[in-house]
Image (cartoon, rainbow, N blue to C red):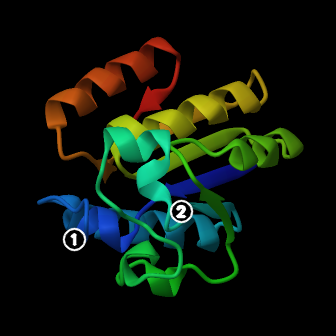
Amino acid sequence: MAKLLVVVDYQIDFVDGALGFKGAEKIAPSIASLIKEFRKNNDDVVFTFDTHDADYLNTTEGKYLPVPHCLKGTAGWGLYPEIAPLLGDAKIFEKPGFGSKELGHYIEEHSYDEIYLCGLVSDICVFSNAIIAKSSASPYAKIKVVRDATSSFDLEMQEKAFDVLKHLHIEII
């Protein structure tokens, strides 16, 4: 059974940087455990990196969220220190918005039976990439979001997003 773990945007700026929030650091042990488990079982692990340039504030996202963050090459763009040593030679998908089209293409090219997602922010980027995974994977693949390895600054919105994902046959485990 081919499995994929997608670690979404667990970057410094989302944990304790420009858009960091209380509690984001608490999911690091769960993410680390998932990465180690997948690697132990020779399953695939990939990462998405929210990636912006100096002109971020001129983008549509920048106009709605006028907080420069995850500027490529800055400290805040990097993986959270507890997770960074686990990157290894994993594939990284840099994305200028919420979802990664490249992740979708990657999933289309592989025959995964199960795709797991974790990281930040549950109701924005994890949500977007779970839908991309669902629409890019085989109709037989199971898509799962790992609840204790994702979080949001708005836990009420997180639960609403999880309800929508369940309605789309994406499991919240």
- What number is the disc on residue 51? 2
Residue 47 as seen in the image, left or right of residue 103: left
Q: Relative to 85, is 145 above or below?
A: above
Q: Residues within 10 Å of mark 2 (few under 14, many from 20)?
A: many
- Image spot of residue 149 (x, y percent): 34, 54
Q: Which residue is drawn at 59% across and 64% down?
A: 38
Residue 93, position in %: x, y?
A: 66, 60
What residue is drawn where x is 49% and y is 46%? 59
**37 vs 69, nearest the viewer:** 69
Q: Name the residue under label 1.
A: 16
Please report whichever mark, 1 or 2, sits nearer to the chain's N-terminal start. Answer: 1
For this view, does 91 lie left or right of residue 26? right
- Choose between 152 and 86: the one closer to the eye: 152
In depth, the one of 73 and 42 nearer the eye is 73
Q: Looking at the picture, how far across and down is residue 20, in whole percent?
A: 22, 62
Asked which quadrant contains residue 135, the reply is top right
Q: What residue type is labelled 1?
A: Asp
Residue type marked 2: Thr
